[in-house]
Each structure stands twice: as C-alpha cells, then as structure tokens.
Image (spheres, grey):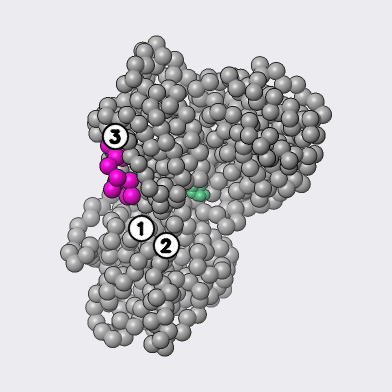
Amino acid sequence: MCGIVGAVAQRPIADILIEGLRRLEYRGYDSAGLAVIDPVTQQLRCIKTAGKVQALSDAEHAAPAHGVVGIAHTRWATHGKPEVRNAHPQVSGSSIAIVHNGIIENFQEIKQELCAEGYQFASDTDTEVIAHLIHKIWQRERRDFFGCVRQVVARLSGAYGLAVINSEQPDSIIVARSGSPIVIGVGIGENFIASDPSALGQVTDRFIYLEEDDIAEVTRDKITIYNGTAPVNRETVRLHLDNDEVLKGHYRHYMQKEIFEQPDVVKNTLQGRISKTQILEQSFGVAAKAFLDKAKSVQIVACGTSYHAGMVAKSWIETIAGLPCGVDIASEYRYRKVLVPQDCLFITISQSGETADTLAALRYAKTLGYAGFFTVCNVANSSLVRESDVALMTFAGREIGVASTKAFTTQLAVLAVLAVALAKRRGLSAAQEKDYVKDLNQLPQTIVDTLALDADIKQLSNDFGEKHHALFLGRGVQYPVAKEGALKLKEISYIHAEAYPAGELKHGPLALVDADMPVIAVAPNNELLEKLKSNLQEVSARGGQLYVFAHREAGFQNNAGLSVLNMPHCSKFLEPIIYTIPLQLLAYHVAVLRGTDVDRPRNLATSLTVE
Ligand code: G6P
C-alpha cells in the first residue's frame, strides 16, 4: 500500500521526507510526491513525479524544495491511474495539501456536492475530495484549522490514514487514522509522522501509535490527540529499528537475502518456544493457556501467502491435534454468514498485521461469539496485534521484498508449535511430543541443507525464461505448498502459474498440458506419493515437461521429460516448510532471468491496507 511521511522541524526536511519514502517504497511505488511550506515566503511548494521515489529525488535535486514543515507520499494506485496528477499530495487552493492511504467510500457523494459549489477536480483520486472539503471549511471559518479537519474527517467513510498541512497555519501537521495506520515520531524540538515507523528510523526511536479514530495536531514541541470530542493520551514506545536490517548486504535483491535468512529467522522464532524435548507453552504468554484449554475447534483467516500458511496449519491442527479447523480468505470471510461452533478459537495470520481485509475479518469475528482471538504476526504494535487477545509473534525481521518468503516459513514454525500445544491437550504422549520437538529443533539445519540446492535450481530456471504458463502440483498438505510456489512465480516473474491438487488434474487442467507447459510437482516420500506418481504419469503421457522436487528415496529418475531435484531428508511433519524453499528459489531465479523488478513487482505491495 501507499506510504506517508511528514515532518515539522526547524531544519530543512526534503531529504528526511525522501529518505522516509525510500524506506516505505516497499509499500507502493507507482508515483511519489512531497509538499513543503517555505519558511520565508510561507508558500506551499509541491513536487510530484510518476514512477519510483528516485524520480522524485531527482526532481527535488534539480529544483530544491526549501521547507521545514511538510508531507510526502509514495503511492500504490487505487482510484485513478499512476500519473502525476493522481499522485499525492493532493492540493486545494494555494494552501492546503494532503496525503492519504486507504479508500474514501463516500467520495462520489462529496465530490458531487463540491462540484456543485464550483470546486474543480484535477485528479481521479478519492483523496482530492478531502483536500477540497478541508479548503471549503477553512475558507468559511478561518480559525482553528485542527477543528476544521476534525469536521471533515467526521464526514468520511471508508479507511484512511492521512496527513494535512496548511501554509496559512504553517507550524503544524494534522494526522488522522481510521483503518490505516499512522505513527507520530517524537523528536527534540521537532516531530515527525509516518504510516510506518520504519520510515523514521533515521530521525527518532520514540513513537506514538494513533488508535482507531484518533486525530492529532503535531507541532514542533506539542502533540495533541483527540478521539471523538475528548483529548486522549497515548503511550510513547521506544523501538530499536535496526537500520542494517534494511540493507541488502552482499545479496542482489532483498528477496534473495530474505530467502537465505530463513535458517536464522526460523531459529529465532522457535527460540524460547521449544526445549530439547518439549513445547514451552508459557512462551505464548499467560493469557494463551485458558484459550487453548477451552478450544474445541479453530477458525483461521488470512490473505495471500499468509492464507497458504493457514491451509498448512489446518492440516496440522486436524491431523496432529485432532481439532476441526476451518480456513478462510479474509476478504471472503468478512462478507459471509458465519456459523460459529461453541468454543472455537479464531486465528488471524499476517506478516504486516495491517492487512485491511484480515483486520476487518477480525473485527467482524469479534461480533460472532468466538472463544478467543489469536494472531500470528510479524509486526509488534500492529493493529492485529493490538486488537487480538494473544499475539504469537514471528521473528522474521522486516520483510522488504514484496513476495513474502521468510514471513511464511516463520508463520509455519509458530503454527507448528501451536498445533503441538493443542495436541497436548488431546492426548499427545510425551514421546510423541518429543518427536515433534526434535523435528523442530532440526528445522533450521534442514533449511540450510535445502538452500544448498540454489545452484541447481538456478540452472533449472533457464528452462522457464521463455515460458508463459506453469502448473504446480501437490497433494495433501503439499497442495498449499504448490499454491505458494505458483503465487511466488506469478508475482515476480509474471508467468501465469496455477496450482492444483494433483488428483484434480484430470478434471480440467490436463487439457492445457503440452511441451510448452512446465509442470512442477512437490513429491515428498509420504503416503500420497504413489498417487502423485500416477498423476504425473498422466502429464508425461501427454508430452508435458515435469520438474519434480522429490525425496531422494521417492524413486524418480531423470529422463527427457522429467527433471528431478533431490531434496534433503526431512521429517514428514515439517515437509511443507522445506518443500516451499526450492519453489521460492525457482521463482527468484526465473524472475532474475526475465529481468523483472524482483523486490518491487508491478502492481503489488507488501502490505494492503485497503480493501
Ligand atoms: C500482499 C502481499 C503478500 C501477503 C498478503 C497478506 O498481497 O504482497 O505477500 O501475503 O498481502 O499480507 P499480510 O501482511 O496480511 O500477511
């Protein structure tokens, strides 16, 4: 999604704004802009460019924007094409500028009203209505700008995180949050705002998170926050944002770095949660126990890659813990009639903790009578963490590549521990627990062994450079793995890829199989192996080219139509984690070969804070 940054300082801020946008570029990058108030002339100066933040930086260097108060934005288009006129800030008159994340649902109605009063619209955005509405009220009242913005915000429906400046009131920024995060970065004699604290790591380590429906006036030395008509206090938290983390090091892309970080981040995520022989359930926090004791079933809700983690977790929770488990895509769940069984535990899974659909699903679920709300999440202080009873954090570190990799495997590590914790309540013996925990303890090393296949997979990727389609097959718990592999490939290489449970091949997709359709299969040595082999025969018989990631004892032989890549030995339990890794590497190498922007694929964003 889009990114917002702003500053009210005593020093020039253009470089701070642009650096903040660079750090947020993983959220959206089709156009960018900034607006500052010149301290001498008190005029608003706005620069906007199409494309990445570098274009904005070049434009600003060519004609510097002098200012000590300002706002900036990097955009992921929702309303209106990614063109300069639709980039933010959106401006009204000569004094008001606004940046906005989210979607204003009643913008057409407000637009009609403003058009009737003579306002002319220069963009196709929903955001421009907010700028004009603020302008209209400010022209009428000419006092208490904070109050004017509060009146406007009260008229908006939808989701927003926004920041406004007014060159006629040049010493403040006003920010508001409803459904899309905003933080205030606290400085000394200067303050900052952003949609994500990572934008401000270079200027402060103290942050105030706005809560839902908060609106704040931020000046150099004062922060005033209201919720409704009442002033409120919000805690200041200290965050240690490790800047090294955002550097690529010797890797060519963030995605590559993040794939290779998996042994470490999975280890971090498991640390403190397992001993040599046991699950350490107290690491879930004191609140978790009562919910786990009570749970008779589980409902998981998530989007994208996190949804695939949910599909794997469903299989674990049902087979290991013997509890019924449902899994839904959040954008569907939030609009369907749901029947909630008694004592059902609701779990969201999300890397960012800010995905609008997942958050809305949680809020909807809270009206339905679930027994408790867990989230598996990578971002402390995110909305999902704050609104859930229990947060099971993944310690993946910041994920910058848009195609999620280490977030997925750390989610699975947490969910595996959770499945065993639930199983313990339903008769899992100490010996069985010990076996599962042994597997988990070996997991980081097995990931290292799997990453050693990188060179072979790079070699394999040469076959995919010219392809337009690919089919991924898996069975049982490997079906979500196949889905994740297909998602990775389509996201970053733009090759159309689909995943099927292999048994379903004959019911349609087999019609597509020919020499131009590579078929990738994940084939651990499990009880479905022979069934999978029969399905793959159906592909070979039709001249399809097969690529099989197989257990070395699965009995596949390389031949003209079949390329086999032998996987290291791993426990059956954790095969979904291990078999995902070669598919990440395959997608990565194919994308590099095709010359796409691996970390910032077209049209996508890391965190989707709009519906
Ligand atoms: C976007 C990202 C995906 C991610 C999904 C859910 O589509 O590009 O990588 O899986 O959102 O995000 P979440 O933060 O909720 O896991």
Residue under label 3, please give it.
342
Is residue 604 in view from this perspective? yes
Would the CB of label 2 be found within 8 Å of ligand 1?
Answer: no
Identify whether 55 is placed above or below 364. below
Q: Is residue 10 left or right of residue 506?
A: left
Residue under label 1, please give it.
179
Q: Does the magenta stretch include residue 371?
A: yes
Identify whether 120 is placed above or below 483. below
Decide which of tag 2 and tag 1 comes sooner along the chain: 2
> Range of the magenta residues?
363-375
Q: Residue 386 or 427: which is nearer the viewer? A: 427
Residue 162, by quadrant, is: bottom left
Would the CB of label 3 be found within 8 Å of ligand 1?
Answer: no
Image quadrant where one finds the C terminus: bottom left
> Residue drawn 49% across and 32% down?
312
> Residue drawn 58% across and 19% down?
527
Instruction: Tell me the CA gap for discs 2 and 1.
Output: 8 Å
Instruction: Tell me the CA gap for discs 1 and 3.
Output: 29 Å
Q: How many numbered discs, if any?
A: 3
Q: Is the Cβ of the residue at disc 2 closer than 8 Å to that at disc 1?
A: yes
> Residue drawn 34% across and 16% down?
427
